[in-house]
Image (cartoon, helix red, strand yellow):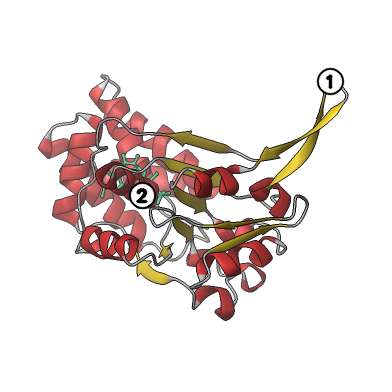
C-alpha cells in the first residue's frame, strides 16, 4: 500500500525559516538538483517542503515510505478493471508527468529495489524507465525529487548508501533555536508568548536528558500539540503529559520521571 497525496496548495503554509534553507531549496529547484533533508522527526521538514512547493507554484506529491514500499508502488502497475488490464501510474510517475515536487518522507524505510528507480532520476539523466510498459520518461524542468530521513535512528542497515546520498544536495535540520521555536509554537497552537516560552524550556530540559533510553525527544510537533490542548483550555501539566510525556515513552518509570520534570519546569 502506498500513502500518497497530490495537491496543489492554495495558501502558502506558514514556515519560519531557520537559516537560508528557502534560498538553497529554490536554487536547487532552478538547477534541477534533487534535495535530501536530514533531521529528527517533528522538526519541520514536511512543513518546509509544503511551504516551498506552494511558493514555487508546483503541486506536491508526498509518499510516506515504509518497509513494504516497492519500486512498483512508486512507478505504477497493471490493474485489472472489468476484464481489461490497464496501466495505472504510481505517485512517482504521476509527479513526473505533472512537473510536481515529489517528496519521499523517511526514504530509508523503503525497499531496496526503489534505488534502481531513484538513481537515474536523481542524477543528470532525470530519467524513468517503466519496464512493464517500455516507456521512457524524461523529467520536465519543473519536476523535483526531495527525500528525507532521520539519521538519529542509528540503524546502519537503514542508512542511505553513499552512491545514493551523493546524488543529492543535502540539508541538515535540527530543532529551531529557542526564540524561533517559541514563535512557531505560539503561531501554530495559539498559546500566549509566555506559555510558548515555558513549553520551549520544557523541551530544552527534555532534550538535555540522556539517562533515559528515549528513542526520540520532545519535537516541535509535540510542543505544538501540547500548545493546542492548552489553548483549548486544558491544564498545562495535563496537556504536556498527554501530548509529550506519553508520546515519548511506554515505560512506566520513565513516564513518571518525565512527568516530574514537567511539574518542575512548568
Ligand atoms: P517533520 O516532517 O520534520 O517530521 P513537520 O514538518 O511535520 O515535521 O513539523 C511538525 C509540526 O511542527 C508542523 O506541523 C508545524 O506545526 C510545526 N513546525 C515545525 N517547524 C516549523 C517551522 N519552521 N515553521 C512553522 N511550523 C513549524
Classify 10 Å Cα crowding around label 1: few (below 14), some (14-19), many (20 and above).
few
Q: Is residue 139 left or right of residue 44?
A: right
Residue 156's quadrant in the figure?
bottom right
Q: Quick check: marks 1 and 2 in contact, CB under 8 Å? A: no
Residue 40 image position (x, y, % from top left):
42, 58
Image vertical order of residue 237 relative to residue 103, above or below? above
Q: Is residue 17 left or right of residue 219?
A: left
Of residues 109 and 210, which is closer to you in this image?
109
Q: Which residue is mark 1?
A: 82
Residue 121 image position (x, y, % from top left):
55, 64
User: What's the residue at 56%, 58% (across, down)?
Assistant: 107
User: Which of labels 1 and 2 is toward the front?
Assistant: 1
Task: Specify which label sits upstream in the sequence, 1 or 2.
Answer: 2
Residue 137's quadrant in the figure?
bottom right
User: What's the residue at 27%, 20% (across, down)?
Assistant: 232
Image vertical order of residue 162 relative to residue 47, above or below? below
Of residues 252 and 218, which is closer to you in this image?
218
The yes-or-no answer for disc 2 within 8 Å of ligand 1 is yes
Q: Is residue 80 left or right of residue 260?
A: right
The yes-or-no answer for disc 1 within 8 Å of ligand 1 is no
Amino acid at each position: 500500500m502506498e500513502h500518497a497525496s497530490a495537491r496543489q496548495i492554495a495558501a502558502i503554509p506558514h514556515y519560519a525559516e531557520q537559516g537560508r534553507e528557502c534560498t538553497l531549496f529554490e536554487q536547487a529547484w532552478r538547477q534541477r538538483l534533487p534535495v535530501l533533508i536530514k533531521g529528527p522527526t517533528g522538526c519541520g521538514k514536511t512543513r518546509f517542503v509544503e511551504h516551498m512547493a506552494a511558493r514555487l507554484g508546483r503541486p506536491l506529491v508526498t509518499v510516506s515510505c515504509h518497509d513494504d514500499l516497492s519500486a512498483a508502488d512508486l512507478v505504477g502497475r497493471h490493474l485489472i478493471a472489468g476484464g481489461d488490464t490497464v496501466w495505472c501510474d504510481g505517485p512517482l510517475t504521476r509527479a513526473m508527468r505533472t512537473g510536481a515536487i515529489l517528496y519521499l518522507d523517511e526514504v530509508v524505510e523503503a525497499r531496496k529495489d526503489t534505488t534502481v528507480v531513484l538513481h537515474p532520476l536523481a542524477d543528470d539523466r532525470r530519467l524513468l524507465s517503466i519496464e512493464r510498459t517500455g516507456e521512457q520518461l524524461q523529467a520536465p524542468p519543473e519536476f523535483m525529487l526531495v527525500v528525507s530521513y532521520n539519521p538519529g535512528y542509528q540503524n546502519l542497515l537503514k542508512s542511505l548508501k553513499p552512491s545514493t546520498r551523493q546524488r543529492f544536495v543535502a540539508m541538515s535540520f535540527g530543532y529551531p533555536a529557542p526564540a524561533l521555536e517559541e514563535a512557531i509554537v505560539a503561531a501554530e497552537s495559539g498559546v500566549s508568548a509566555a506559555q510558548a516560552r515555558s513549553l520551549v524550556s520544557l523541551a530544552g530540559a527534555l532534550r538535555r536528558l540522556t539517562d533515559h533510553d528515549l528513542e526520540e525527544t520532545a519535537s516541535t510537533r509535540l510542543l505544538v500539540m501540547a500548545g493546542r490542548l492548552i489553548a483549548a483550555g486544558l491544564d498545562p501539566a495535563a496537556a504536556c503529559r498527554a501530548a509529550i510525556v506519553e508520546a515519548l515513552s511506554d515505560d512506566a518509570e520513565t513516564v513518571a520521571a518525565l512527568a516530574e520534570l514537567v511539574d518542575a519546569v512548568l
